[in-house]
């Protein structure tokens, strides 16, 4: 069974967008025992299976909110 082509979507554009979203930068985090226990409790309570997605979302939401609050002013 052949895939249906979506009219108006350029395959080169889609592959370029996919390449831009590729995560190729690594950063390591270390947690102490109490922090790790809190993370494990959170993941158990809210049924989080992908901790990396949880960390990424939490970190980026904090960064983006602080950047939004401290935007440069003209005066």
Image (cartoon, rainbow, N blue to C red):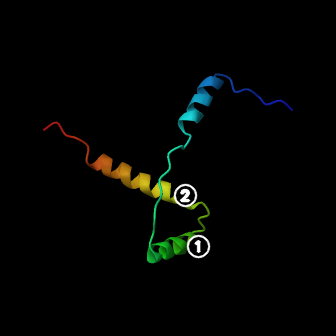
Residue at 31%, 47% in the rendered image: 67
Between 22 and 2, the one lying in front of the other is: 22
Residue 32: x percent and y percent? Answer: 44, 73
Place residue 49 in its image quadrant.
bottom right
Q: Which residue is mark 1?
A: 44
Helix, strand or loop under label 2: helix
Asked where in the image residue 14 lies, by quadrant, the reply is: top right
Left or right of 31 on screen, residue 67: left
Q: Is residue 7 above or below residue 74?
A: above
> In the rendered structure, which disc, 2 or 1, sits on the residue that comes first in sequence?
1
Q: Position of residue 23 (x, y in %)?
A: 54, 44
Residue 51 location (% of width, % of height): 56, 62
Residue 1 is tagged as none
Q: Which residue is mark 2?
A: 52
Q: Residues within 10 Å of mark 1 (few under 14, many from 20)?
A: few
Q: For the point 54% across and 56% down, which residue is it? A: 53
The image shows a total of numbered marks equal to 2
């Amino acid at each position: 069974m052949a895939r249906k082509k979506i009219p108006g979507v350029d395959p080169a554009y889609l592959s370029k967008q996919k390449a831009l979203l590729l995560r190729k930068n690594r950063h390591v985090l270390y947690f102490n025992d109490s922090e790790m226990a809190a993370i494990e409790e959170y993941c158990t309570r809210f049924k989080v299976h992908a901790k990396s997605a949880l960390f990424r979302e939490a970190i980026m939401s904090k960064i983006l909110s602080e950047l939004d609050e401290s935007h440069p002013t003209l005066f």
